[in-house]
Amino acid sequence: MYCEKCGTYNPDDTAICLNCSAYIPTTPQYAGFWKRLLAAIFDTFLVAVIGGPISIILGIILGSVAGSFVGVLGNDYFFPALFSTMFFFIAGIFLVLRWLYFAIMESSSHQATFGKELMGIRVTDMNGRRISFWRATLRHFAKILSAMVYYLGYLMIGFTRKKQGLHDLIAGCLVINK
């Protein structure tokens, strides 16, 4: 396990850091379903409030440029093409912003999104270390599988020994209390 105070690696059976003498909990306390759900609700709200307007503005700009190109070609269906193109750009930009929010925040030194910070939890690898941007990306997109069949991949959190959802198992991650 890694020492939370100084970051030094210590053997798993060590209770005191060999470098700074800080106490190291030998078994991490896994974050439960309800804490994680509240963090997810907060993060979803935050991404919608901040990412939504950004996506709409950029989507309208990019969609108008691309949609007007269709109109220049002499298409009789200019307005439907314009609006569907704008919608495509708005949705695409929103999905990219959502992915970047989760991947950057969970792979940062905080190891948590703002919702997880608020709930006092963080994302680690199986050894308690910070995850990489690519592992955070895998975890983010694996959430699609967790949601596919009536959110059973998320409900697994309440029933697995280490409180892991399907997306955590796929990415090799743990969500622990700070």
Image (cartoon, grey):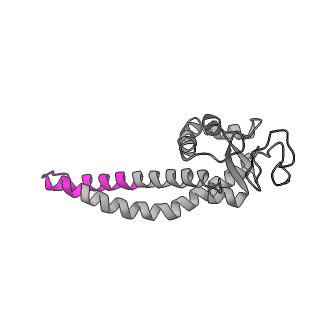
Main SS of residues in magenta: helix
127 left or right, relative to 133: right
Residue 161 quadrant: top right
Of the pair 97 and 48, the residue shown nearer to us: 97
Of the pair 3 and 28, the residue shown nearer to us: 3
55 left or right, relative to 178: left
Task: Tell me the residue at 58%/35% (across/down).
Answer: 149
Q: Quadrant of the C terminus?
A: bottom right
Residue 157 quadrant: top right
Residue 2 seen in the figure: yes
The percent coordinates of residue 30 (x first, y second) are: 76, 45
The percent coordinates of residue 62 (x first, y second) are: 31, 59
Task: Tell me the residue at 62%/45% (across/down).
Answer: 131
Residue 79 seen in the figure: no
The percent coordinates of residue 93 (x first, y second) are: 41, 54
Residue span colored magenta: 67-90
The percent coordinates of residue 68 (x first, y second) are: 21, 58
Residue 151 quadrant: top right
Of the pair 42 and 122, the residue shown nearer to us: 122
